[in-house]
């Protein structure tokens, strides 16, 4: 877990869940609630944590960091 980041409690709410069946396996896509943090650096640190801990791959441009 990253250091304490104001605005992030450590909990995320799933807002939408989609199952994508195929012949080989079922894929799952989850939409998560927005997290608002005070700075771009805090956002990048949180993104690194999600990537390393859970394999999530956020896109900085899609998230509006630039």
Image: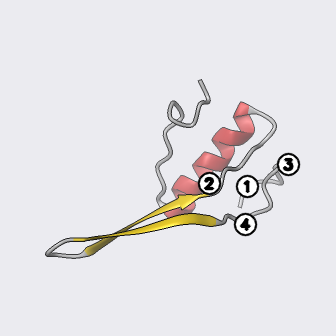
C-alpha span from label 4 to label 3:
13 Å
Quick check: marks 1 and 2 in contact, CB under 8 Å?
yes
Task: Residue at 77%, 42% (x, y): give it.
Answer: 37
- Dot 3, how many residues are within 10 Å of its Cα: few (below 14), some (14-19), or many (20+)? few
Query: Residue 45's spot in the image, x, y percent?
Result: 67, 44
Q: CA distance from mark 3 to mark 1?
A: 11 Å
Q: Residue at x 16, y 75 (%)?
A: 24
- Disc 4 and disc 2: Cα gap in Å? 13 Å
Which label is found at residue 6?
3
Q: CA distance from mark 1 to mark 2?
A: 7 Å
Vertical placement of 30 versus 64: above or below? Answer: below
Q: Which residue is mark 2?
A: 49
Residue denoted by label 1: 2
Mark 2 neighbour density, 10 Å: few (under 14) some (14–19) many (20 or more): some
Please give left or right for residue 59 compared with residue 33 in the image: left
Q: Is residue 52 left or right of residue 2?
A: left
Q: Residues within 10 Å of mark 1 (few under 14, many from 20)?
A: few
Query: Residue 43 sits in which quadrant?
Result: top right
| Of the image marks 4 and 3, the number of the one nearer the N terminus | 3
Instruction: Determine which residue is flagged by label 4.
Output: 11
């Amino acid at each position: 877990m990253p250091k304490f980041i104001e605005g992030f409690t450590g909990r995320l709410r799933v807002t939408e869940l989609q199952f994508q069946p195929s012949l080989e396996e079922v894929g799952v896509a989850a939409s998560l609630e927005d997290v608002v943090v005070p700075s771009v650096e805090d956002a990048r640190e949180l993104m690194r944590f999600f990537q390393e801990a859970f394999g999530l791959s956020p896109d900085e441009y899609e998230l509006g960091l630039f």
